[in-house]
Image: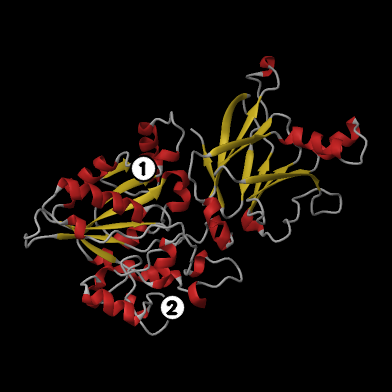
């Protein structure tokens, strides 16, 4: 991988894997870029040596999960062939973008904006103009107003002080919005190269596939069909090198052309997906609309009290409501990745709506004792978890009971939890109550509602 960070254009003259962008090699079968020498000679004889997949990408194409980037591996796991590629090596390759005059297409995941937003994006692209492409809109609820989503993205980008040319929303699955995004790129590139950047698994390579398909139709004489399509897989860190695609030319004989570049994804250290076992990658990738699972902590406390050996009385119920309620969020057969701790006193009006992929499992634990001797205070972290995996939700001060969402807990790489309070009766609506104090820790961030 050292050759990937060399300065100059030496890499452009190497024969690279069309799937991941790594230079091909024939001497180490346990490393990225490996191809059997006999197979390479065979492909070379057919003039197909620039369309070769390395052994790792061949496995990825067959649907296997073959991570190799260090940050995507859970504790104790090793990458492909026992090899590990640090994300710093991938990030160094992006340093050339700021040194070039180009158009940056910045891909973000609208379902996980906090997890796919790169804080140092301007350090990567420099002063180059940027177009935002929000992906995975097909997974939003069917009646979602896309104009509101676009305005929300513009609002957040202004708050983050990132000036952009345009915001486009697309679906790589259904091709919705692709035409508008392609037309915007063609309009703004002004003869410049185009670099597609974004966080790992934001949908960059899938977007490039759709972009090339559209360019092939738009410029039938441009021989866009000769461009290699980047490999798309569920494994974070599929693309390991800059991949140059001569996508922008009006005819096959035109001496003037510009390139489209697929780039390695930027790995977010705060993503909860990094805590998953390799075999759980397929679970976390949404394939249908997000599911919503709403719980009422007070009802769950009562249900668990009835199922316990203790007698149900006003005294025992108040004692149980005076202790924390814990919700563990994860996948069936996998250790929980996140804990949401509802700190006492437990309000009968509080509701938590877990929004995420449909196969997430939620387990409730009531009557959780605090860390102090009297059973109060914040509970100790669940076994195998640290504070970075825990969100604390504390009961409120001065909030009207209209049932509106008080705030969202953004769970990077998973989804979010909407915290709301509803009146028990219609007569109680409009009466003030204590406002929600949400104390997320580290990897969960609070997104207030307007």
Question: Residue 371 placed where, x, y %?
Answer: 79, 54
- Relative side of 125 to 187, left or right: right
Helix, strand or loop under label 1: loop
Graded by Cα atoms within 10 Å as few (under 14), some (14 to 19) or many (20 or more), the crowding at tag 2 reads: many
Q: Tell me: residue 28, above or below residue 362.
A: below
**Residue occupying image coordinates x 32% and y 75%:** 23
Q: Nearer the viewer, residue 50 or 361?
A: 50
Is residue 137 placed above or below 270 in the rendered structure? above
Horizontal arrangement in the rendering, residue 269 relative to residue 350 (left or right): left
Specify whether 405 is left or right of 265: right
Query: Residue at label 2?
Result: 31
What sort of colour scheme is used for the picture? secondary structure
Is any part of residue 9 visible from this angle? no
Q: Position of residue 171 (x, y in %)?
A: 36, 42
Q: Nearer the viewer, residue 68 or 126?
A: 68
Could you say where residue 59 lies in the image, as x and y percent from the top left?
A: 44, 66
Q: Dividing the picture into quarters, in which one does residue 205 lie?
A: bottom left
> 300 and 236: which one is in front?
236
Q: In the image shown, does 8 or 238 lie closer to the viewer?
A: 238
Whether residue 447 is visible, yes or no, is: yes
Q: Up-down: is 155 above or below 53?
A: above
**Residue placed under numbered mark 1 in the picture:** 171
Q: Earlier in the sequence, mark 2 or mark 1?
A: 2
Q: Quadrant of residue 248?
A: bottom left
Category of crowding for the residue at label 1, using alpha-carbon neighbours closer than 10 angstroms: few (below 14), some (14–19), many (at least 20): many
Residue at 22% x, 77% y: name it: 45
The quadrant of the image that shows the N terminus is: bottom left
Q: Which mark is residue 339?
A: none
């Amino acid at each position: 991988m050292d050759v990937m960070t060399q300065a100059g254009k030496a890499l452009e003259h190497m024969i690279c894997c069309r799937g991941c962008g790594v230079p091909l090699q024939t001497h180490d079968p346990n490393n990225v870029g490996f191809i059997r020498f006999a197979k390479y000679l065979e492909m070379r004889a057919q003039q197909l040596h620039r369309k070769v997949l390395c052994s790792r990408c061949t496995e990825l194409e067959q649907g296997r999960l073959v991570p190799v980037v260090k940050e995507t591996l859970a504790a104790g796991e090793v990458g492909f062939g026992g090899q590990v590629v640090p994300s710093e090596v991938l990030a160094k390759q992006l340093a050339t973008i700021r040194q070039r005059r180009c158009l940056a297409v910045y891909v973000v995941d609208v379902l996980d904006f906090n997890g796919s937003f790169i804080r140092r994006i301007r350090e990567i692209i420099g002063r180059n103009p940027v177009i935002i492409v929000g992906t995975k809109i097909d997974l939003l609820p069917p009646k979602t107003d896309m104009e509101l989503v676009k305005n929300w993205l513009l609002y957040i980008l202004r708050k983050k002080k990132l000036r952009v040319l345009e915001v486009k929303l697309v679906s790589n699955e259904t091709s919705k919005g692709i035409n508008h995004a392609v037309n915007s790129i063609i309009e703004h590139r002004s003869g410049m190269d185009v670099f597609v950047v974004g966080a790992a698994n934001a949908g960059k390579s899938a977007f490039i596939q759709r972009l090339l398909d559209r360019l092939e139709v738009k410029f039938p004489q441009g021989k866009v069909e000769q461009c290699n399509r980047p490999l798309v897989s569920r494994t974070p860190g599929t693309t390991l090198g800059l991949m140059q695609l001569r996508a922008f030319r009006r005819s096959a004989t035109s001496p003037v052309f510009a390139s489209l570049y697929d780039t390695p994804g930027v790995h977010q250290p705060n993503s909860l997906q990094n805590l998953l076992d390799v075999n759980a990658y397929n679970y976390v990738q949404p394939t249908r609309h997000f599911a919503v699972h709403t719980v009422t902590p007070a009802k769950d406390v009562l249900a668990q009290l009835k199922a316990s050996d203790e007698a149900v009385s006003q005294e025992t119920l108040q004692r149980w409501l005076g202790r924390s309620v814990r919700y563990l969020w994860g996948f069936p057969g996998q250790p929980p990745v996140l804990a949401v701790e509802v700190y006492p006193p437990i309000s009968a009006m509080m509701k938590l709506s877990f929004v995420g992929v449909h196969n997430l499992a939620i387990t409730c634990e009531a009557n959780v004792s605090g860390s102090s001797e009297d059973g109060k205070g914040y509970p100790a972290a669940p076994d195998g978890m640290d504070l970075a995996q825990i969100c604390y939700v504390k009961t409120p001060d001065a909030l009207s009971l209209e049932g509106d969402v008080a705030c969202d807990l953004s769970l990077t790489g998973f989804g979010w939890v909407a915290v709301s309070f509803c009146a028990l009766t219609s007569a109680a609506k409009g009466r003030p109550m204590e406002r929600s104090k949400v104390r997320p820790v580290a990897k969960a961030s609070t997104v207030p509602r307007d």
